[in-house]
């Protein structure tokens, strides 16, 4: 901003902080010297963000905005927010990239462009590489920057020769796309990018390069009660978001409370789309800085630091993330270390996460949360990721309900070193591996599970459990295995033969025959390769029957076709309630709502009421064979 803009900003701020709430307008045809009214809109969203006070609305009109929005202040409460919204019916794009033009063809058949580093301001993503705790670079450098052709990201290569002579990556689905490649060199005052666009002329098409590390992120904590809705976010050079680090996604809350992020399209983040995570002061990639301690010890230390830094229901979390579409991000669609506690994540479509697979690491999933305390994850559709949903450390009071998972090639749900209670009910888990369970104190009720399950202990890591509905730590323990409940689920048992070298996997619940802690298992239906628990009295096994189950996608709608026999009607099951589930062993906490009220699992996947006397096994009340596909999302 120039001096005149700063002076105007100071005048506006002094007038608005004490005045009545107002609506600011922003347009690509506006001016930051205007007054921000509908007739005289501002040009920059971030300019308006420096003026807005609790109760204000910032309405952004159609167009592309290439800027970092860094709000100066937040709202005061759920009823006195600062709202950022796209104008009704108008497409508003907020991009972390800049357009580049003037590509030159080189003698080796590639294209070359050199840009001034002034385009990047104080952050050059072609001089910064992805780095962080639990990140695996697979032996090479990965810059946080990216090159896009007509909105699609190209594949970075570590040598120029691999750009001149690209080879398709046979390990991924988009093999043709993997031959569109680039390489960069950045030093001094310029950055040079060499690219192979195959037969495409980049000067006749849109080419963009990432230029900002984020799109919407306050650079300080304490910016609470914001609403962000209706935007298209894309192409930010986001850094690896480890749970022990400051987590900056394309939209990032920065250790705040009460944000609503809704009805947005979020795509093409180098690492994460949305982060609900922690700030830097309590640790930033502490394990990478000190390998003399185990990473789990470092995370315990970080957790204790966050508690001293105010991690509590009163100050942190309680976000709502709903009705967003998130895709083409290479780490997570949504992640959050401790900052996702007490939040609701619902009705999001998260897909095609970690599809390029040029790097890996232990923080990759459609949704990856640490410490999802009293967090509800409901009615989401998560597909074509590595892992679908990963709940790691301190999931307590968490409910995973009425979600559709499919075509995830690691597993749909991974529960890692949690002590519960975690309730997983009425989900469709349709991938080759449905549940990967390295936790205890969980309840699985009325789910449809197509593929394999695993269950195993973790004797080498002590992880926290908490007082009920609180961040306050009650104790630490290892994972013994067991203390789980499985009621009224259907296991289809379809898929590849089990690998005898990995004994922790199985179809059905036979893996619980060797659980160390007690388990409660009853009223489940098993088909094909799925086998029941040895002490389960009310079960039906149908080893000779192979069900049909598949998802069909049509115009962003998902339809399930399932063909089974009539055993759904034969099961004599009971309604599952908080009382029936008991308490998780270590936290001695019931499977109940965040406010302490009891849960009755008396509705099905669609929200239909269940029979109170004899509810149908599986996620659909009154289920029969569905020869005709039924819409499930």
Image: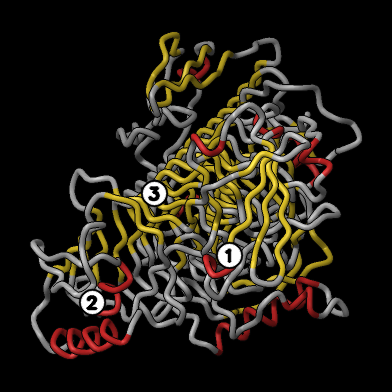
Q: Is residue 601 visible?
A: yes
Q: How far apart are marks 3 and 2 (CA)?
A: 28 Å
Q: How crowded is mark 1: few (under 14 residues within 10 Å), some or many (20 or more)?
A: few
- In the rendered view, tell whether residue 551 sits above or below residue 485: above
Colour mapping used in the image: secondary structure
Mark 3 or 2: the one toward you: 2
Give the x, y percent position of residue 51: 24, 79
Residue sitting at x 52%, y 62%: 249
Q: What element carries label 3?
A: strand
Mark 3 or 1: the one toward you: 1
Q: How crowded is mark 2: few (under 14 residues within 10 Å), some or many (20 or more)?
A: many
- In the rendered view, tell whether residue 109 sits above or below residue 417: above
Residue sitting at x 51%, y 22%: 551
Residue 116: assigned label: 1
Circle 3/circle 1 CB separation < 8 Å = no
How many numbered marks appear? 3
Q: Mark 3 points at which residue?
A: 346
Residue 137: assigned label: none
Residue 52: assigned label: 2
């Amino acid at each position: 901003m120039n001096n005149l803009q700063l002076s105007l900003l100071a005048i506006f701020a002094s007038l608005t902080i004490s005045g009545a709430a107002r609506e600011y307008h922003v347009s690509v045809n506006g001016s930051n010297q205007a007054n921000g009214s509908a007739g005289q809109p501002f040009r920059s969203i971030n300019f308006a963000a420096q003026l807005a006070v609790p109760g204000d609305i910032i309405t952004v009109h159609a167009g592309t905005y290439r800027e970092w929005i860094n709000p100066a202040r937040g709202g005061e409460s759920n009823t006195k927010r600062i709202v950022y919204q796209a104008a009704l019916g108008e497409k508003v794009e907020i991009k972390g990239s800049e357009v580049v033009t003037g590509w030159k063809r080189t003698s080796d058949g590639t294209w070359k462009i050199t840009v001034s580093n002034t385009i990047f301001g104080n952050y050059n993503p072609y001089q910064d590489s992805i780095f962080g705790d639990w990140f695996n670079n697979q032996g090479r450098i990965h810059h946080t920057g990216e090159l896009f052709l007509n909105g699609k990201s190209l594949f970075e290569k570590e040598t120029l020769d691999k750009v001149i002579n690209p080879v398709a990556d046979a390990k991924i689905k988009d093999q043709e796309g993997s031959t569109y490649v680039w390489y960069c060199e950045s030093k001094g005052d310029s950055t040079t990018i060499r690219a192979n666009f195959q037969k495409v002329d980049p000067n006749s098409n849109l080419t963009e390069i990432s230029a900002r590390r984020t799109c919407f992120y306050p650079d300080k904590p304490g910016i609470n009660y914001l609403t962000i809705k209706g935007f298209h976010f894309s192409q930010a050079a986001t850094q690896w978001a480890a749970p022990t680090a400051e987590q900056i996604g394309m939209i990032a809350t920065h250790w705040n409370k009460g944000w609503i992020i809704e009805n947005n399209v979020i795509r093409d983040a180098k690492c994460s789309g949305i982060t609900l995570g922690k700030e830097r002061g309590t640790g930033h990639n502490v394990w990478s800085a000190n390998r003399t301690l185990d990473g789990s010890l470092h995370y315990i230390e970080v957790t204790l630091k966050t508690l001293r830094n105010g991690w509590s229901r009163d100050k942190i979390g309680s976000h709502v993330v709903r009705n967003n579409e998130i895709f083409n991000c290479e780490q997570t669609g949504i992640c959050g270390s401790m900052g996702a506690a007490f939040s609701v994540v619902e009705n999001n479509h998260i897909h095609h996460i970690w599809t390029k697979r040029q790097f890996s690491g232990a923080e990759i999933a459609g949704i990856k949360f640490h410490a999802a305390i009293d967090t509800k994850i409901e009615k989401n559709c998560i597909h074509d990721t590595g892992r679908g949903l990963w709940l790691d450390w301190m999931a307590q009071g968490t409910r995973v309900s009425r979600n559709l998972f499919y075509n995830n090639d690691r597993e749909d749900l991974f529960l890692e070193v949690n002590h519960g209670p975690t309730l997983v009910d009425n989900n469709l888990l349709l991938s080759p591996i449905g549940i990967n369970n390295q936790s205890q104190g969980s309840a699985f009720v009325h789910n449809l599970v197509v593929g394999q399950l695993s269950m195993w202990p973790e004797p080498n890591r002590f992880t926290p459990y908490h007082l009920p509905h609180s961040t306050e730590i009650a104790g630490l323990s290892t994972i013994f295995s067991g203390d789980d409940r499985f009621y009224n689920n259907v296991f289809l048992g379809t898929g590849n033969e089990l690998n005898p070298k990995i004994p922790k996997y199985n179809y059905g619940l036979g893996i619980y025959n060797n659980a160390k802690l007690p388990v409660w298992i009853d009223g489940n239906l098993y088909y094909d390769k799925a086998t029941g628990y040895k002490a389960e009295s009310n079960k039906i096994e149908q080893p000779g029957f192979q069900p049909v189950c598949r998802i069909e996608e049509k115009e962003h709608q998902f339809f399930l076709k399932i063909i089974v026999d009539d055993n759904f009607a034969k099961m004599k099951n009971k309604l599952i309630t908080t009382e029936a589930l008991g308490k998780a062993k270590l936290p001695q906490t019931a499977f109940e709502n965040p406010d302490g009220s009891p849960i009755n699992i008396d509705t099905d996947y669609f929200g239909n009421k269940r029979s109170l006397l004899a509810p149908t096994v599986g996620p659909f009340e009154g289920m029969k064979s569905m020869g005709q596909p039924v819409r499930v999302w």
